[in-house]
Amino acid sequence: MSDPLRIAMVVEGPTDSIVISAAITSLLNGRTFIPTQLHPETSAAFGEMGTGWGGVCRWSRQAAEQGGGSLRNNPLFEFHDLLILHLDAEVADENYANAGIDEHHADLPCSCACPPASNTTNALRQIVLRWIGEVTAPPKTVICIPSKCIETWILVGLYPHDATAKSADLECVLCPVARLQAKPAPGRLIRGGKKDVERYRERATEIASVWPGIRARCAEAERFSTEFLAQV
């Protein structure tokens, strides 16, 4: 029997790692894995880097520095078989000042015409690669960029008959938080604009079960799935 895969995750927030873990559960089809959320840190009030995309940026730049200028040489790979770097595509509309980051590169904002969503996600991938000191995704690393946000995957998976979920240009619709918090109270994931972490955990098995349908509707979910499987 294969040893469990040791999968590290760097995400914008704790609910993102729950959704990605659910996707991995489906993709591995019974193979066990051990997920570890490297960022945001769960033990110290998210540490000094903070949550959100700014925290992912700070973590990425620090990880590259620890690797002598590139992520691939970071010692974290001695303890993990795979690293997932997550960033929502809506970050393409941000700028570094919004996250309190001193950055001389003017590569944000980088949003492009949509559809296709890949216009923007490809541009954002190049920025993430610069953060980690790489030209292409290094070995044992998968970049995950849902368009426009990971809640798009949840909406189409858990509420496939929702009008927005049925939209032909689903991945070009702004983050569907409003759609999710308007769903029936039983199972509602977002309340008053805040994500209910426990409710996300409760529905993780359901998200895993509908992952094939999410892949079929969302090109970036399919891209993540394909690149993840290529690594394992």
Image (cartoon, rainbow, N blue to C red):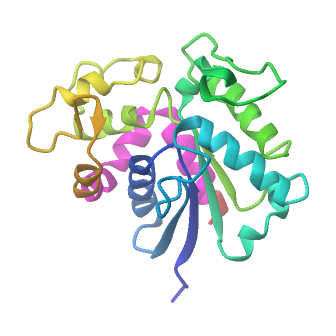
* Residue at the limit of the structure toward the bottom, as seen here: 1
Taking the magenta stretch, the answer to whether it contains residue 32 is no
Answer yes or no: is residue 137 visible. Answer: no
Q: Residue at x 81, y 44 (%)?
A: 136
Q: Is 216 one of the magenta-colored residues?
A: yes
Q: Position of residue 80 (x, y in %)?
A: 65, 72
Estimate the x, y position of residue 220 in percent, counting from the top left: 53, 36
Principal secondary structure, stretch drawn in magenta: helix
* Residue drawn at x 39%, y 17% as measured from the top left: 168
Give coordinates of residue 206: x percent, y percent. 24, 53
Which corner quadrant holds the C terminus? bottom right
Any part of residue 194 in sight: yes
Q: Is residue 36 above or below residue 203?
A: below
Q: Residue furthest top?
A: 113
Task: Give, as a single range, the part of the protein colored magenta.
Answer: 204-229
Q: Quadrant of residue 178?
A: top left
**Residue at x-position 67% and y-position 21%:** 97
Query: Relative to 192, is 54 on the left or the right?
Result: right
In this view, 128 is above or below 100: below
The answer to which of 44 and 222 lies nearer the viewer is: 44
Most foreground residue, 177 or 41: 41
Q: Is residue 129 above or below residue 68?
A: above
The quadrant in which residue 39 appears is bottom right
